[in-house]
Image: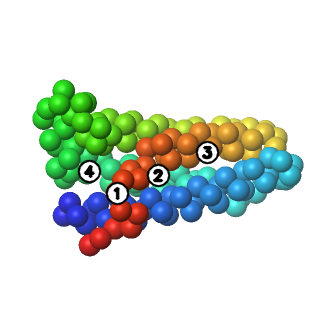
Amino acid sequence: MYTFVLAIHNILRWVIVILAIVALVRAYRGWFGKREWTPSDRKAGVFFSISLDVQLLLGLILYFGLSPITRSAIQNLGAAMSNADLRFFALEHFFLMVLAVILVHIGTSTSRKAVEAVSKHRRAAVWFTLAVLAIILGMPWVRPLFPVF
């Protein structure tokens, strides 16, 4: 079960990267091109947000239930903090990914509440950019880029 959930978690990160690129391109093109806010712009942010929500759910299942890495880290948190790999998965990855989810939700919410189209795009671009930075910093680059079943 652990291997399967981890593989889905790994595959979904690439879906998130693609959706992030789409949402960012739409937001920046709308902002700098002074374009109207369209239903497709809103959907790009919503799909990005939903994919992060699903990823967070899978991550929480791994973190609190299935992962032997976090299980051993939680059992001895002091020792985990002195080991860079354990600290990354026990603390840094978890914190940055939760932060990314929060930032994307702020971006979708504030862009929806803005009145002017350019303001909607600007808010989405800023918050989505911050979320993507958190994702890049929190992504486990030491892991294989694609899952092995």
**Spot occupied by residue 72 in the image (x, y as percentages of width and height):** 14, 41
What is the secondary structure assignment of the residue under circle 4? helix
The residue to which callout 3 is attached is: 128
Mark 3 surroundings within 10 Å by alpha-carbon count, few (fewer than 14), some (14 through 19), many (20 or more): many
The residue to which callout 1 is attached is: 143
Q: Residue 61's mark? A: 4
Q: Amino acid at mark 1?
A: Arg
Mark 2 surroundings within 10 Å by alpha-carbon count, few (fewer than 14), some (14 through 19), many (20 or more): many
Q: Residue at x 29, y 60 (%)?
A: 6
Q: Amino acid at mark 3?
A: Phe
Q: Amino acid at mark 4?
A: Ile
Q: Residue at x 41, y 53 (%)?
A: 141
Q: Earlier in the sequence, mark 3 or mark 4?
A: 4
144 horizontally vs 50: left or right: left
**Spot occupied by residue 42 in the image (x, y as percentages of width and height):** 67, 54
36 horizontally vs 59: left or right: right
Q: CA distance from mark 3 to mark 4?
A: 25 Å
Circles 4 and 1: CB atoms closer than 8 Å: no
Q: Residue at x 58, y 55 (%)?
A: 20
- Image vertical order of residue 48 relative to residue 60, above or below: below
